[in-house]
Image (cartoon, helix red, strand yellow):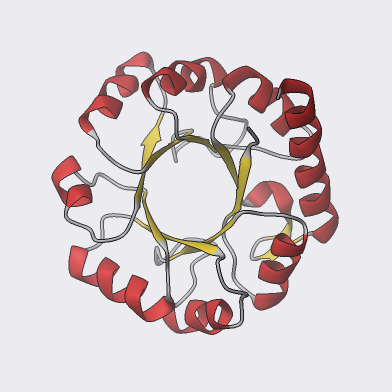
């Protein structure tokens, strides 16, 4: 077993290629307007068209109409859909592509919602209102008991990702700001350090 890695908030081809060369398994494109790493469908399509075949591309949406989600995914060549809002289980089940549902963890009560969803993977994150620090790893560890495909996000960096994996043992980890030089631009050295940290802890654990 190994921990998969998704580099999210891709806004340009250079960052996409850097992430893939470093060994990332998936790239995330954020289609949520008025967020720092928003990308237009046209720009995302231009990037994805230049990528090698068999690369996993994830479109991130929040409370969008189903028809809009489907149209953007088709236009851009997205392979999975990540839902970061209040989308219902019924909403998720009606989409034609694999779905990753995001659950924000603030208390144990939030764990109860996990059982409602029958999706391809669950991503646990810290609440949007909390802009600093990392996800509550103890809550994330409990969430891990609900699914074999748990994706861990929320303040991960090259310095803390190994401890997070050791605690939670997720299927995958998701990072955006933790490997940035500045908003909308990734740092190749941070990406490399993040990937190396994941590989090293995997060797220890698996």
Relative to 60, is 115 above or below?
A: above
141 over 154 or under it: above or below: above
Whether residue 126 is situated above or below residue 196 in the rendered picture: above
* Residue 50, image quadrant: bottom right
Front in this rendered view, residue 102 or 147: 147
Q: Is residue 158 above or below residue 12?
A: above
In the picture provided, is 197 more to the left or to the right than 135? right
| Residue found 66% across the figure and 68% down from its top | 16
Look at 36% across and 15% down and name the residue there.
Answer: 108
Residue 160 seen anywhere in this rendered image of the structure: no
Residue 106: x and y in percent read 41, 23
Question: In percent of the image, x 70 and y 63: which residue is there?
Answer: 20
User: Taking the image as drawn, is residue 55 in sight?
Assistant: yes
Q: How many numbered callouts? A: 0
Pinpoint residue 148: horizontal percent, then vertical percent: 44, 29
How far across and down, in percent of the image, does residue 17 sit?
Answer: 71, 70
Residue 145 in which image quadrant: top left
Figure quadrant of the N terminus: top right
Task: Report the residue that reaches farthest toward the left.
Answer: 90
- Residue 184 image point, x, y percent: 64, 65
């Amino acid at each position: 077993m190994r921990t998969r890695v998704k580099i999210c908030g891709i806004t340009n081809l250079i960052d996409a290629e850097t992430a893939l060369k470093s060994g990332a398994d998936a790239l995330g494109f954020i289609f949520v307007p008025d967020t720092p790493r928003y990308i237009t469908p046209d720009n995302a399509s231009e990037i994805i068209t230049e990528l090698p075949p068999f690369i996993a591309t994830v479109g991130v949406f929040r409370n969008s109409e189903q028809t809009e989600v489907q149209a953007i995914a088709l236009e851009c060549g997205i392979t999975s859909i990540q839902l970061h809002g209040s989308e219902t289980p019924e909403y998720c089940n009606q989409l034609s592509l694999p779905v990753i549902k995001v659950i924000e963890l603030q208390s144990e009560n939030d764990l109860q919602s996990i059982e409602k969803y029958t999706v391809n993977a669950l991503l646990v994150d810290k609440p949007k209102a909390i802009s600093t620090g990392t996800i509550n790893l103890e809550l994330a560890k409990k969430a891990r008991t609900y699914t074999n495909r748990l994706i861990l996000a929320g303040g991960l960096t090259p310095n803390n990702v190994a401890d997070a994996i050791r605690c939670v043992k997720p299927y995958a980890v998701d990072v955006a700001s933790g490997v940035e030089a500045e908003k909308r631009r990734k740092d190749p050295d941070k990406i490399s350090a993040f990937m190396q940290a994941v590989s090293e802890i995997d060797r220890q654990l698996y």
